[in-house]
């Protein structure tokens, strides 16, 4: 009888350790996805190669989400970055959803990505951005704010989501164009 209890105890401890090991591996996967996403943006990758690498990261991120391995606020935020660098409104919507969950889990988390993903989502639907996170520049033209409705969000809400006030955005735009 003691042998049976010992075997059950070893099995429970073994299963528990394997689950924790799996979570650590998945967390490491999430960190690697996030870091390669960020590092790729600092490199001189051609757009076609970057786009392919982004697609592979989104596929892996979806696998992690589907397997229930994205648990913490930070993990939700890191995976949200992967989708914020997506190609279309469905990717941006997923980034928004992930950031909502991250904020729900930890109200102190950096919320700026929520605003940026929201602006990208709106612009992808040919609607004006509302936070003012998306700047653009063409070869011979100055930096501009993409289609922007400054009346939808207050400066107080912009600050809540880590975004500059309208006055600060105007200063930033002037500085960008004077460099």
Image: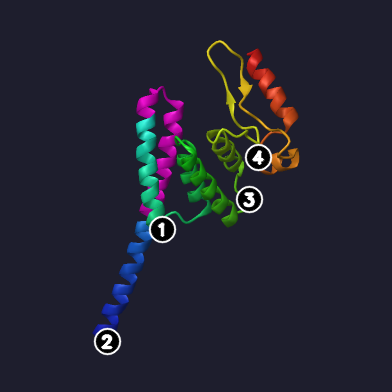
Magenta-drawn stretch contains 25: yes
Say which residue appears at 50% left-offset and 55% top-offset: 72
Q: Residue 8 occupies which quadrant of the picture?
A: bottom left
Instruction: Name the mark on residue 68.
Output: 1
Q: Is residue 106 left or right of residue 24?
A: right
Q: Which residues are magenta?
A: 24-50
Q: Which label's residue is closer to the chain start, 2 or 1? A: 2
Q: Main secondary structure of the magenta part?
A: helix
Labelled disc at residue 2: 2
Residues under labels 1 and 3: Cα distance?
23 Å
- Name the foreground residue: 16 vs 49: 49
* 18 versus 159 height, above or below: below
- Residue 51 is left or right of residue 140, and the answer is left
Residue 179 sits in quarter: top right
Residue 48 within the magenta-colored segment of the rendering: yes
| Rendered position, 168 above or below 14 | above
Q: Rate crowding at label 4 as few (under 14), some (14 to 19) or many (20 or more) other CA atoms within 10 Å.
A: some
Evaluate if marks 1 and 3 touch, with contact meaning CB atoms under 8 Å apart.
no
Q: Comparing marks 2 and 4, which lies closer to the viewer? A: 4
Q: Position of residue 168 (x, y in %)?
A: 72, 28
Q: Of label 4 and label 3, which has the lower sequence position?
A: 3
User: Where does label 3 land, which residue?
Assistant: 108
Q: Which residue is mark 4?
A: 162
- Judging from the image, what secondary structure is the residue with disc 1 in? loop
């Amino acid at each position: 009888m003691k042998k049976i209890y010992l075997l059950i105890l070893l099995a429970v401890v073994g299963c528990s350790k394997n689950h924790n090991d799996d979570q650590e591996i998945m967390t490491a996967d999430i960190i690697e996805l996030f870091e390669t996403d960020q590092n790729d943006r600092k490199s001189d990758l051609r757009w076609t190669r970057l786009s392919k690498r982004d697609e592979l990261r989104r596929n892996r991120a979806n696998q992690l989400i589907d397997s229930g391995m994205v648990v913490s606020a930070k993990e939700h935020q890191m995976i949200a970055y992967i989708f914020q660098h997506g190609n279309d409104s469905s990717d941006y919507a997923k980034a928004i959803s992930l950031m909502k969950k991250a904020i729900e889990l930890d109200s102190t988390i950096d919320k700026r990505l929520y605003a940026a993903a929201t602006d990208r989502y709106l612009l992808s639907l040919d609607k004006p951005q509302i936070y003012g996170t998306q700047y653009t520049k063409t070869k011979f033209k100055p930096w501009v704010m993409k289609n922007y409705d400054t009346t939808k969000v207050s400066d107080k809400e912009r600050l809540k989501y880590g975004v500059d006030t309208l006055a600060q955005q105007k200063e930033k735009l002037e500085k960008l164009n004077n460099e």
